Structures are given as structure tokens and as C-alpha cells.
Amino acid sequence: MHNLTSEDRHANDPFEPGPAVVLKREPLAPNLQLLTVRAPVVASKIQPGQFVIVRADEFGERIPLTVADWSPEEGWVSCVFMQVGTSTYKLGQLKAGAALPTFVGPLGKPLELERWGTVVCAGGCYGIGSIYPVARALREKGNRVISLVEGRSKFLLYWLDRLAAVSDRMLVSTKDRSIGDNGYCPGLVKGLLAAGETVDRVIAIGCTFMMYEMAEATRPFAVKTVVSLNPIMIDGTGMCGACRVSVGGETKFACVDGPDFDAHQIDWDLLLARRKAYLGPEADSAEM
Ligand SMILES: Cc1cc2nc3c(=O)[nH]c(=O)nc-3n(C[C@H](O)[C@H](O)[C@H](O)COP(=O)(O)OP(=O)(O)OC[C@H]3O[C@@H](n4cnc5c(N)ncnc54)[C@H](O)[C@@H]3O)c2cc1C
Ligand code: FES
């Protein structure tokens, strides 16, 4: 367990007055884990669509994670993370009781949530967890929620029961067809729209390519589509410029102007190219 120094305490301050402590870490699927942290201040303020920045240990980099669930009453926050490199590997080694040197939030703008009518909520990978509080909030506002879930196979999916409980309809797609067909969320939403389903808004969270494909799937039908971008972030407070994206011809910082943006306004070519820029150093770090 990591003992906090006064510098570490400052890293939590002013967001969290005491140390953020791991309550539970559990595997949800191969490579995907749920991290639940005692963080009463974050839990009392967080809203769907927002994220936290976490450091697994005092040598670790700051990584952004979207919130998947929280309890203001009990003072905890949960995130689903995929182990893709050094920092998420370290998170996956944490034990209950470990103190996190950094757990700051809520960061980013809350997602716009209104009573629109029928809303499609799509999630893939860690986004299945991140879309859950969005679907729950939209249902509470009186929307009809259609949830779409994708994964390579049935054994890589999780929280289907939780998502079903806050959805009016749920459709699942897997690459190996172990559940549903293999069109993934873009194929599912295209199918719904082509069949004449009235959809007032689409919200998608997953890997960048999935969100790009969702944008292309809904573009011909002119259904407003909002995605939660996950570019490289460093400070998460609008200072470093690492997370800049181009939306509607304007430069935006995903950490403070987003992370949620109109998918039809995003310059996807630029975004996908920028994400590749750090692959070399990240591979080196993972080998260390
Ligand atoms: C607003 C936001 C919310 C996110 N929410 C989640 C979430 O809920 N669950 C989850 O599993 N992942 C989430 N991510 C992505 C997550 O932050 C990265 O997977 C993580 O930083 C990877 O770190 P690593 O050292 O394990 O891997 P690395 O080896 O550093 O990188 C592996 C991959 O992660 C990307 N990445 C690396 N550093 C960052 C960074 N600082 N910010 C964004 N992407 C990065 C790289 O482009 C690369 O594709 C989110 C990203 C953003 C920007
Ligand atoms: S992460 Fe530095 S400006 Fe957004």
C-alpha cells in the first residue's frame, strides 16, 4: 500500500480533502476491470459524461477515466478501465486499501441531458460502463432508451443486466456472432434508422474508431450524434493543449470544452492521426 506524502495530499487537493482509497478492484471481462474508489467530494459533484484523472502510484502518469457509477450518499466512484499499457496495467494491480496519489474530478463538461424522446445509447469496450449512467439519467428524464452494446465476443461483454434495467430496448452485436449479428453498434443503429425507427439523438462511447463509425452511420439520417472523445490528455484542465481537437472548424480542448462533441462536426482525420503520434513512446514505456 502506498503511504501518502504531503505532496501526494496536495495532488488530491482541492478536489478531494482526504486520500482517495481503493475500495474494490474486480475483473469484469478479460482485460477490463472495475475500479471503485472512496472519493466523497468527487461522488457528490460528478455528473454523467464527466471524467476523473487518476495516478496509480507516485511515479505514474495522469490518465483520464470516465465515470461509470457513483454514490453521493456512500461517497464512492467507479470507473471501468481497459488494460492497454503501463498505467492501466498498474491500476489493474491495485488492492483494496491502496491510496491513490491522484484522483481528481469531476473534469470536463457534464453531458447535455434533456427529454428528447427516443435516445440511442451505444457502448463498446470501457464505454459499456461509461454509457450506463447516461442511459440511466436519460430514462429518469422520461426518454425511451434504446441501448446498443458491442464486443468481439459474448465473454468480453459485461453489465448487460444493469444496462437492460435502464433501457426500454437493448440490442447486442458481437464480431463472432456469439450474441446478435456482427454489425457492431454502427450496424445496429443503421439498421434501426433504415427500418424507420424515430431516433431523436444518439450518444456513443467507445474507442475512437467506433465513435467515428457511429458518426458515419447516422450522418445520412441527420440524427444528432454525440460522442465522448478520448484524445491524449495531460493536465485535463485546458493548460497543455495536448487534447486539442477540431470541431466545426474550431479548435477545442476536449478536457474543458468536452469531452462530448457533435460527432458530425468533428475532424476525424485529424483526430485519428493525432492519436497515432504517441504509439512509439507508449510501446517503449510498456516494455520497461
Ligand atoms: C476523457 C477521457 C476518458 C477516458 N475514459 C476511459 C475509461 O473510462 N476507461 C478506459 O479504459 N480508458 C479511458 N480513456 C483512455 C485512457 O485514458 C487510456 O487508455 C490510458 O491513458 C492509457 O494509459 P496506459 O499507460 O495504460 O497506456 P498507453 O501505453 O499510454 O496508451 C495506450 C493507448 O491509450 C491512449 N492514451 C495514452 N495516454 C492517454 C491519455 N493521457 N489520455 C488519453 N488517451 C491516452 C493512447 O493513444 C494509446 O492508444 C479515456 C480517455 C479520455 C481522454
Ligand atoms: S489535457 Fe491539457 S489542455 Fe486538455
Image: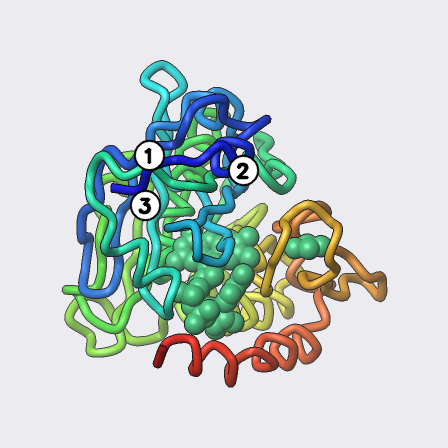
Question: Does residue 189 appear to the left or right of 126 in the view shown?
Answer: right
Q: CA distance from mark 2 to mark 3?
A: 42 Å
- Residue 191 shows in the view: no
Q: CA distance from mark 3 to mark 1?
A: 31 Å
Question: Where in the figure is residue 173, as x and y percent of width and height?
Answer: 29, 66
Q: Quadrant of ligand 2?
A: bottom right
Q: Which residue is mark 2?
A: 11
SS at mark 3 in the image: strand
Name the residue that disc number 3 marks: 169
SS type, badge 2:
helix
Question: Could you tell me the amino acid type at mark 3?
Answer: Arg
Where does residue 233 sit, x and y in percent of width and height? 60, 59
Q: Is residue 94 left or right of residue 48?
A: left
Q: Quadrant of residue 272?
A: bottom right
**Labels 2 and 1: the sequence-earlier one:** 2
| Residue 71 versus residue 131 in the image, above or below | above
